[in-house]
Image (tube, rainbow, N blue to C red):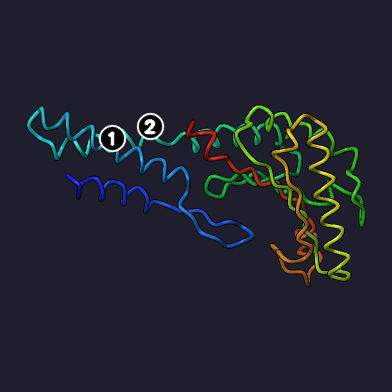
C-alpha cells in the first residue's frame, strides 16, 4: 500500500516543474504538487474502499486519480484568469503567456511609453485599466512588474529607465484599485534580453515591461 502511494504521487509530480524566468530557480509546479497531494489522499481513501470491495490495489489506483483531479485549484484559477486577460487584451499589443502557474503579460515599450521616457502613453491607459479589472477579480496573486531595456546607452541609464517604467506601471495599477501590498516593481535594465540586440527588431523586443502574476499558495490552502 505504501508503495502504491509513493508511485502515484511520484508519477504526478514528474509531470512538470516551473522555472522562475529571472532567477532560473526550478520548482515543482504548484498545480502538480497539489495534484500529487490529492493523489496521495485519494489513494489512501480508495484503498480503504477497495479493501471493502475485495481489491485494495484497484481502489488505491482509482482513488489516486480522483484525488489528483480535485487537487488542481491553483491551475484552474490561473486558467480562468488567463482566459479573461486574453479576452480583454485582444488586439492591444500585449501578449498573454503562461509559465507553469505564472501568467506573464509582455508589454512592448513602443506602445507603453514615449521614447526614453517613463511616463505611460495616455493611449495605453485603457489597456492597463483592463489589466487592473482582472487583477482585482482574481486577487489571490502577487503582481510583479519588471522593466527591461535594450543595450543602447549606458548600463546605468538603462537600469534607471527600466526601474522608472516598472514603477510607473505598478503605481498606475495601484491607482486603479489593485492592492499596493500585492505589487512590486523591479528594473532589470539590459540584463534579460529576449532577442538579439544587434538588430533594430531585437532591440525593440527587448525594450519592454512584463507583468508576472503569481498565485499565493496560502490563499489556496486555507
Q: Position of residue 115 (x, y in %)?
A: 92, 55
Query: Taking 7 as reference, is 70 left or right?
Result: right
Residue drawn at x 89%, y 50% as measured from the top left: 118
Image coordinates of residue 18 in percent, x first then y, are 51, 53
Q: Is residue 194 above or below residue 98?
A: below
Q: Position of residue 156 (x, y in %)?
A: 86, 68
Could you say whether the residue bearing mark 2 is in a helix, strand or loop?
A: loop
Q: x and y percent of residue 206 in the render?
A: 76, 60
Which residue in the structure is indicated by mark 2?
A: 70
Residue for point 72% across, 42% down: 183
Badge 1 or badge 2: first in the primary sequence:
1
Q: Is residue 1 left or right of residue 171?
A: left
- The residue identified by callout 1 is 42
Q: Residue 162, located in which quarter of the rendered image?
A: bottom right
Near mark 1 (Cα within 10 A), the count class, few <14, some 14-19 or many ≥20, is many
- Name the one closer to the observer, 71 or 149: 71
Write down the quadrant of residue 170 in the picture: top right
Q: Are marks 1 and 2 in contact (CB under 8 Å)?
A: yes
> Residue at 75% across / 54% down in the picture?
186
Amino acid at each position: 500500500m505504501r508503495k502504491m502511494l509513493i508511485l502515484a504521487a511520484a508519477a504526478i509530480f514528474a509531470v512538470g516543474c516551473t522555472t522562475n524566468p529571472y532567477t532560473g530557480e526550478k520548482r515543482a509546479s504548484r498545480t502538480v504538487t497539489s495534484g500529487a497531494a490529492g493523489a496521495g489522499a485519494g489513494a489512501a481513501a480508495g484503498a480503504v474502499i477497495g479493501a471493502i470491495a475485495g481489491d485494495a490495489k484497484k481502489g488505491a489506483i482509482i482513488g489516486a486519480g480522483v484525488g489528483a483531479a480535485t487537487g488542481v485549484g491553483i491551475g484552474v484559477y490561473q486558467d480562468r484568469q488567463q482566459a479573461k486577460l486574453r479576452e480583454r487584451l485582444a488586439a492591444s499589443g500585449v501578449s498573454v503567456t503562461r509559465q507553469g502557474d505564472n501568467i506573464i503579460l509582455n508589454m512592448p515599450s513602443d506602445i507603453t511609453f514615449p521614447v526614453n521616457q517613463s511616463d505611460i502613453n495616455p493611449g495605453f491607459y485603457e489597456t492597463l485599466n483592463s489589466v487592473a479589472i482582472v487583477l482585482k477579480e482574481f486577487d489571490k496573486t502577487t503582481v510583479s512588474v519588471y522593466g527591461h531595456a535594450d543595450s543602447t546607452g549606458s548600463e546605468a541609464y538603462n537600469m534607471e529607465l527600466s526601474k522608472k517604467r516598472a514603477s510607473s506601471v505598478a503605481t498606475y495599477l495601484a491607482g486603479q484599485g489593485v492592492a499596493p501590498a500585492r505589487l512590486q516593481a523591479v528594473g532589470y535594465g539590459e540584463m534579460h534580453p529576449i532577442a538579439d540586440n544587434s538588430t533594430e527588431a531585437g532591440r525593440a523586443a527587448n525594450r519592454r515591461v512584463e507583468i508576472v502574476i503569481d498565485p499565493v499558495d496560502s490563499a489556496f490552502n486555507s
